[in-house]
Image (spheres, rainbow, N blue to C red):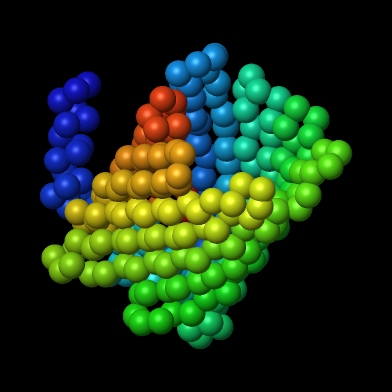
Amino acid sequence: MKRTAFALALAAAAGLGTAQAQDYQIEIEAGYSDFNPDVGEGDSAFDAAFTYYLDRVDVANRPLGEAAFLANASNVGIGYLSFDDADADMVGVQGEFWFDQFYLRGSYATADVAGTDIDTIGARIGWMLAPNLRIAGGVDRTDVDLPGAEERDDIVFEAKYVTDLGGGTALNLEGSVTLLDDPIDDEVFEIEGDYYLNPAFSLGAGLSFADDDDNFELRTRYFVTPMIAGQLEYFTENDGDDDAFRLSAVVRF
C-alpha cells in the first residue's frame, strides 16, 4: 500500500497519468474534518458544497485548481457544514460575477450554535488590476441573536494572483487584511499560496495572524482525472495548541 501511494505521488509530481483536460460547469465537493483541541474533547464535522458556473469553464493549459479564476467564471453556490458532537450547523449561499474586469461577490450564511442564530452577510467589489491579478474590498456584517449583542461590520481587503512559471508549473498567491469591528478592535492578516508541480498536483500553505492568535495550514490536492480530485489539509489554531485534519473530494461535470 505504501509503495502504491508513493508511486502515485511520484507520477503526479512528474505529470504522468494526467488525462486530457475537460471543461466543466458543475462542481460538487464533500469533506470530513477531525478536530483535536489541546483542552477538552475532540469533534468531527461534515461539509458539502455545490457550485454552478453560468458558462462552461475552460481548463485548457491552466492549473485545474485555478481554472475558474483564470476564466473569470461567474457562478452561484450553496454550502452546508454540520458538527457531529457540538450542537452547530451552518448553511450558506454565495455568488461571484464578472463583468469584463469588474468583479462582484455576495454571500449569506446562517448558523445555529447551541440554539443561538448567527447570520453573516458579505459583499465584495473588485477589479482585475492586471492579467490574473484581482484586488477586492468589502464588508462582512455579523448579527448574533443574543440580548444586547450588536451587529459587527468587518472591513476586508484581499488580493489573488496566479502566474504561469512555465513547463506546466504555476503559482497561486493570496492575501487579505480584515479590520475587525468594535468591541474586538483588531486586525487579521492572512497569506497563502499553492505551487502547481503540474496542472493536476499542487502543494500549498497558509498563515493567518492577529495580536493574540496565529493559525497555520498545509494542504495538497491531486486531480486523479480532470474531473475528480482529492485534497488533504492540516490546520493549527490558537498558536498551535489545537489542530485539525480535513479530507475532501471534488467531482466536476
Q: Nearer the viewer, residue 70 or 136?
A: 136
Q: Percent position (x, y) of residue 214? A: 40, 40
Relative to 239, residue 37 above or below: above
Location of the N terminus (image quadrant): top left
Residue at x 43%, y 73% (from the top left corner): 134
Is residue 249 depicted above or below 6 in this figure? below
Give left or right: position of 249 versus 217.
right
- To which quarter of the image does residue 105 belong? bottom right
How many numbered discs, if any? 0
Residue 82 in the image, given as x and y percentages of width and height: 64, 32
Percent from the top left, x then y, of residue 102? 53, 82
Judge left or right: residue 119 versus residue 163.
right
Is residue 49 visible in the rendered structure shown here? yes
Q: Tell me the residue at 52%/57% (across/down).
A: 178
Pick the front one: 66 or 157: 157
**Measured from the top left, where is residue 95 in percent x and y?**
63, 64
Q: Compared to 118, does 32 lie above or below?
A: above
In-image side of 82 versus 232 (left or right): right
Q: Is 29 displayed left or right of 22 in the figure?
A: right
Outermost residue to the right: 147
Q: Quadrant of residue 141?
A: bottom right
Depth order, front residue of 207/26: 207
Quarter where residue 99 is shown: bottom right
Residue drawn 19% across the image and 38% down it: 9
Would residue 77 be visible to someone looking at this image?
Answer: no
